[in-house]
Image (tube, grey):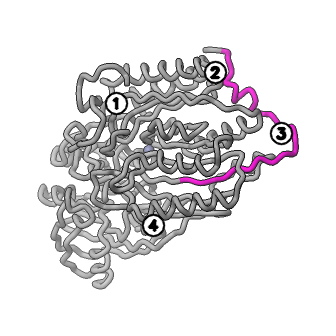
């Protein structure tokens, strides 16, 4: 262990030396966009927060008595397809106008994801951050919090002074990362520092399901970050796995080092890039993965229950539509009983169930409408078991507009199917229990998810990852890329160097 302290830790207890108030603007854009999905993300998908509602997301602002935070606006959506250009242009124009009207700014704090895409355009974050820089001027410090699935570009780096990304997937540290991005910004404002950002693309692009920090090699790779930060006396460092379902030239894994000594900071980024590159062959699924029928067969043989099957190709939290009924189709074809499918998005089918009422028999054509490229509707004859209206999104952050989500639970050949009006992940036990469902009672639970989030992982006696069809198909080596920078690992097995 090194005994060197990060400069940030060394000054964490500094109290403001004057009464001067730094003026910091708050904004953000967050939507992980799958360019293989035909389901565009627009106004109906985004939750836009502003003012006090937005500021309420960041409790750590209260720690900085010498900073006046002015919360402008943040747009945030569930992962999906590319953003409609009109929505992005409107959001950007409004944000830039607010920045111009409320300045001058000492700093800008940005709550980002990093893998947005606007239909027909490249490097959205690069575009937005360059525009923000132009308004706030070169002296203002801009700090961004990123998801480790963000695809960073040089243009992004050139517009920022600070960037820090999540260090866990599943993202247990999302709030801690936001707090760190803010702490870095305030530290640099107080001390009058302008750090160096060293960015290295690493030509590796693997799905999150192969790079969770819950297992190797990402667990050990990410565990080296504190040591690298200490050894090179950095302010911060990040490893970004990148987002694989983006057919854009910027899509890549990368590392970013932030430090005060330019040479040491660049050396640190080289070191981290080498560490990332060195483990490329070790990325693999953390659980048994296979074709849908094989997963159903294994689940039925398992002596314990429930077995959780991830319908990974249509995972809405990675950008899938969430309406492909393929796994349900195979469960029915194979005669699987005691199965729960949660869920399939289909507002029309939910409306039919509501019209018919609890206990009624209904003929439905389920799913396959939002993403007709990867799925097709499945005709079923079902019985309506229960009807519900639940808040959406279930995990709304402070200030977000919460909408009603109509839900129907139906039974078809002994399989319980949850039909939702809106695209709905099932990540918490309460997502099931508020529908009067106890997933532990079923032999098989199918969720539209990739790697299991903690509450669902705790439920699973065994977890299987189904390589199912959809916009976020895990067979990445055969995705129809046209614009990805090549060579890229593992699509091209023997790329040279680390970029
Ligand atoms: Zn992510």
* Lower sequence index among marks 3 and 4: 3
Eye-nearest disc, 3 or 2: 2
Left or right of 268: which side holds 186? right
Q: Mark 4 points at which residue?
A: 434
Q: Mark 2 points at which residue?
A: 261
Q: Which residue lies furthest to the left in this view?
A: 333
Q: Name the residue under label 1.
A: 204
* Lower sequence index among marks 1 and 4: 1
Give residue 286's position: percent from left, percent from top: 33, 34
Q: Do the residues labelled 4 and 2 touch (CB within 8 Å)?
A: no
Q: Which residues make up the magenta segment?
A: 3-28
Question: Residue shown at 61%/63% (left/top)?
Answer: 50
Eye-nearest disc, 4 or 2: 2
Left or right of 156: which side holds 19? right
Q: Do the residues labelled 1 and 2 touch (CB within 8 Å)?
A: no
Eye-nearest disc, 1 or 4: 1
Q: Element at badge 3?
A: loop
Q: Which of 42 and 428 is in front in this view?
A: 42
Using the numbered discs, state the Cα–Cα distance from disc 3 to disc 1 in whole angstroms: 43 Å
Q: Element at badge 1?
A: loop
Eye-nearest disc, 1 or 2: 2
Visible in this render: residue 65? no
Q: Element at badge 2?
A: loop
Beta carbon at label 3 within 8 Å of ligand 1? no
Quarter of the image for residue 4 reads top right
């Amino acid at each position: 262990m090194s005994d060197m302290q990060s400069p940030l830790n060394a000054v964490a207890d500094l109290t403001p030396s004057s009464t001067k108030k730094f003026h910091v603007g708050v904004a953000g854009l967050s939507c992980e966009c799958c360019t293989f999905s035909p389901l565009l993300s627009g106004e109906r998908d985004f939750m836009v927060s502003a003012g006090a509602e937005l500021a309420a997301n960041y409790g750590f602002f209260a720690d900085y008595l010498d900073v006046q935070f002015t919360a402008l606006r943040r747009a945030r959506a569930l992962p999906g397809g590319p953003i409609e250009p009109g929505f992005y242009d409107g959001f950007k124009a409004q944000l830039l106008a607010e920045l111009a009207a409320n300045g001058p700014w000492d700093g800008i704090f940005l709550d980002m994801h990093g893998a947005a895409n606007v239909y027909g355009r490249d490097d959205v974050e690069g575009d937005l951050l360059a525009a923000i820089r132009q308004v706030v001027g070169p002296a203002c410090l801009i700090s961004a919090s990123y998801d480790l699935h963000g695809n960073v570009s040089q243009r992004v780096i050139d517009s920022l002074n600070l960037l820090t990304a999540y260090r866990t997937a599943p993202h247990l540290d999302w709030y801690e990362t936001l707090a760190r991005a803010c702490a870095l910004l305030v530290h640099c404002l107080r001390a009058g520092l302008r750090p160096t950002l060293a960015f290295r693309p690493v030509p590796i692009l693997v799905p999150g399901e192969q790079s969770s920090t819950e297992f190797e090699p990402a667990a050990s790779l990410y565990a080296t970050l504190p040591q690298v930060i200490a050894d090179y006396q950095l302010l911060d460092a990040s490893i970004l796995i990148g987002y694989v379902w983006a057919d854009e030239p910027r899509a890549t894994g990368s590392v970013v080092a932030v430090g005060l000594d330019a040479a040491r900071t660049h050396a640190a980024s080289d070191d981290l890039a080498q560490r990332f590159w060195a483990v490329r062959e070790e990325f693999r699924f953390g659980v048994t993965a296979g074709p849908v029928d094989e997963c159903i067969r294994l689940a039925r043989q398992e002596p314990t229950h429930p077995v959780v099957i991830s319908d990974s190709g249509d995972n809405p939290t990675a950008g899938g539509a969430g309406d492909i009924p393929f796994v349900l189709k195979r469960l029915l074809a194979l005669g699987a009983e005691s199965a729960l499918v949660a869920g399939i998005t289909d507002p029309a089918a939910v409306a039919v169930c509501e019209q018919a009422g609890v206990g009624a028999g209904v003929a439905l054509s389920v799913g396959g409408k939002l993403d007709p490229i990867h799925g097709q509707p499945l005709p079923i004859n079902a019985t309506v078991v229960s009807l519900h209206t639940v808040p959406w999104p279930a995990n709304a952050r402070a200030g977000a507009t919460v909408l009603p989500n109509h839900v129907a639970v139906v039974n078809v050949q002994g399989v319980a199917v949850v039909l939702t009006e809106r695209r709905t992940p099932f990540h918490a036990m309460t997502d099931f229990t508020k529908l009067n469902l106890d997933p532990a009672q079923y032999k098989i639970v199918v969720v539209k998810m990739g790697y299991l989030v903690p509450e669902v992982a705790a439920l699973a006696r065994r977890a299987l990852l189904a390589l199912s069809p959809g916009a976020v198909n895990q067979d990445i080596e055969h995705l129809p890329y046209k614009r990805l920078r090549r060579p890229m690992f593992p699509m091209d097995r023997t790329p040279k160097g680390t970029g």
